Image (cartoon, rainbow, N blue to C red):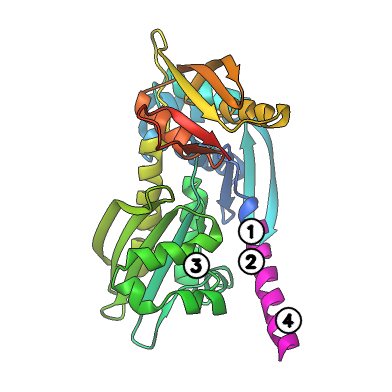
Amino acid sequence: MTFIYLARSLFILLLSFSSLLFASQFDNPYQGNIVVKQQSEAQLKELALKQVLVKVSGNVEIAKLDESKQLLKNTQSILSQYGYQTLKDTRYFMAVFDKHKINQALKEMQQPIWGDTRPTTLVWLIKDSNSDRQLVSDHMVNRSADSALSWALQNQQHNRGIALQFPLMDLEDNLALSISDVSGRFYDPIATASNRYGINHFVVANLKQNSAEKWSLEWELLKYNPLSKQNEVLFSEKVNGKKSSLLSSMVSNIADYYASQYAILENQGEKFSQTIYISGVDSLVELTQLNKVLSNLLAIASFKVTAVEGSQVTVNIKINGGLNSFKNGLSAQPNLQQDLSQSEEFHFNWR
């Protein structure tokens, strides 16, 4: 009995690992991933660039701008590499574009730039059809148990450059959470069940079939604050329509919300400064890691360590874009935890 349980657990872990490998093929926001149908290679390159412009700017309407139309005529000049790959029986055209040229083009268009601050979102989704009612698992999505559902969720993630994760729905999940907890919007047990995945952003959703083609979808995007132990509803929606359209729209709206929080519209004038304080930096290795975290934040134009006192580091930062994007960018870093014992806002603990 123990052997069978261990074998099943290993099988589930292998399935999860393979789905992560598949997702990693699409992680780069500067890579366009287009399903190959009857398009010419020139058309595929243009579609890939359109997708990249949307993913990096967060603006789904960006291709309509005159500057974008001009850029699309010169796709080859900003293309770094491209090729074809078959994944899960689907043939993709994959094109990587020059990051600095894309960013420069967006700056000239006065469009925001959405960098690597893209939280993974755990999705607790109830699918309630005429035949059954169940929580959608990682296995169901990645093995296409419902092809329309899987395609809508996965394709829109690739189009918008965000990552969704679905629960394993193994013994641990089933003991921690019931369908009634999700449908009843009992956020505390949902947040507790989400802890094993190490994800603070999660979606609670009900997808219900009303007729052969008509479905309703009610969902909320939440963030759990591990310090205050509070759940904050960030976005909610209740809509009706075709199943695939509803799910695609949900993913797009999640991406729109993240873009509004983390995309940076660079200041055209003088950049303003902010001092932050980080406690718990106890070694040169951790100081180097802190340097890497700050260097990778698009909200930071430049920074300088001005003091090191014991394990506390004081850093003066010149900010790209607004203060809100800067604060959101810091709060999304797993190594930086806001120090709520301090009365001032920009105190963090390193972890």
Is 171 placed above or below 81 here?
below
- Up-down relation of residue 135 to residue 91 (above or below): below
Res. 113 in view: no
Q: Viewer-nearest of labels 3 and 1? A: 1
Comparing 1 with 125, the one in front is: 1
Residue at numbered disc 3: 150
Residue at the spot of label 1: 20
Q: Position of residue 227 (x, y in %)?
A: 42, 47
Distance from Cα at disc 3 to Cα at disc 2: 15 Å
Residue range of the region highlighted in magenta in the rendering: 1-22
- Residue 98 belongs to the span the image colors magenta: no
Q: CA distance from mark 3 to mark 4?
A: 26 Å
CA gap, disc 1 to disc 4?
20 Å
- Reading the chain from its start, which is encountered first: label 1 or label 4? 4
- Residue at 53%, 19% (x, y): give it: 314
Q: Nearer the viewer, mark 3 or mark 2?
A: 2
Around disc 1, counting alpha carbons within 10 Å, would you say few (fewer than 14), some (14 to 19), or many (20 or more)? few
Asked whether 167 or 5 is in front, the reply is 5
Q: Main secondary structure of the magenta part?
A: helix
Q: Report helix, strand or loop for mark 2.
A: helix
**What's the amino acid at mark 4?**
Ala
- Disc 1, disc 2: CB below 8 Å? yes
Camera-nearest label, 2 or 4: 4
Q: Residue at left 42%, top 23%?
A: 67
Three-letter code for the amino acid on which mark 2 is drawn = Ser
Circle nearer the N terminus (3, 4)? 4
Instruction: Report which residue position mark 2 lands on.
Output: 16
Q: Which residue is mark 4?
A: 7
